[in-house]
Amino acid sequence: MASKTKKARMVQSDNALSDRQGFISNPHFASMESDVLYHLALDTKNFNLTEMFSDVKFVCMGGSPDRMKKLADRLVEELPYSMPTGHTLCNIAGGSDRYVLYKVGPVLTASHGMGVPSLSIILHELFKLLHHAQCEDVIFFRVGSSGGIGVPPGSVVVSESVLDGLLHPHMSLPVLGEIKTFPAYLNSDIVKDLVKFAHDDDGFKTYRGKTLCANDFYEGQGRLDGAFCEYTKDDKMDFLKRLSKEGVLNIEMEAICFAAMCLRANVKAAVVCATLVDRLQDDQLTPSHDTLVKWILRPETIVLRYIKSKLKEQN
């Protein structure tokens, strides 16, 4: 089994570094008459996806549907793209009750839910969407929240690299009864550029470091306040201190899948998260709702500066 896993990892890495197929690498597409993007309420038979989406250059993703709608509203205000007269933002995926999808000029915002399975589903369909739309040079961002390790609550962490719950830099996925592993790397140039867009007068600190992607919110992150807990406070602290020594600055639940799938799709990607608590000090989120909302906007600020800079270069 070990040799099969190793072979699968190398094959996927080779595919990820090849540009010959773009966002997808699925030979079965050649025999499909049409493609249904079920969770986005789109398909290739009833929609002209090229006409609708061919200009997309950036995709911003976050867990909350409401947050992604607010980000789309913010894009309308801050980007040099006006809505046509009589038009307003609409949820393109409104025919499905799973995700939201908004478009403002060349930027898509999409919700991905909580955890790897939910994120994986929409990434498959977004990659297919961009493939059908014949898009090129698209950059993906995950903007979200996380628990910090040794950084002040309210800080922003730009992920340099991602580890899974076993501290491996790859995503493991059971496929047809076997474990396949896929490398999970992020684009180092975008990481450097994003950090440059942090300003001294922001009112918060921006850091770059490793991110741990856990399988859940409680036990997978070493919390003591879940419904079940079979380890001690000392066990928890030993684990968090180990993470800190490894250079891990925050913990969330999607980054390993986000990095691995974007790499397989030949897509440049970055993960930018606010920290809502320092896990070396506490497990529960105690700041007020208004404070948390303010903190969660901070990663968007950094990413929007990057997007606006790139759009200015293109004009």
Image: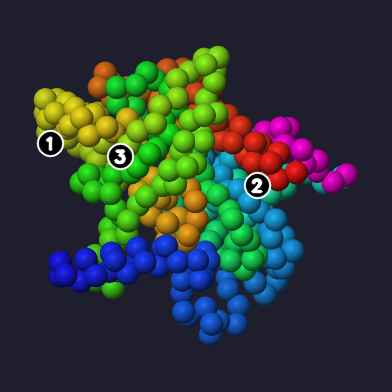
Foreground residue, 100 or 237? 237
Foreground residue, 108 or 230? 108
Residue at 47 percent across and 42 percent down: it is 189
Residue type at mark 3 is Leu
| Residue 84 on the magenta segment | yes
- Residue 311 location (% of width, % of height): 69, 42
- Residue 87 location (% of width, % of height): 82, 46
- Residue 38 location (% of width, % of height): 55, 65
Residue 290 visible in this rendered orientation of the protein: no
Label 2 vs label 1, nearer the camera: 2
Residue 255 visible in this rendered orientation of the protein: yes
Vertical side of 262 occupied by 162: above or below: above
Q: Quadrant of the C terminus?
A: top right
Q: What residue sits right under mark 2 in the picture?
A: 107
In the picture, the disc for residue 230 is 1
| Residue 40 on the magenta segment | no
In the picture, the disc for residue 212 is 3
Residue type at mark 2 is Val
Vertical side of 184 occupied by 45: above or below: below
**Disc 3 to disc 1, C-alpha distance:** 21 Å
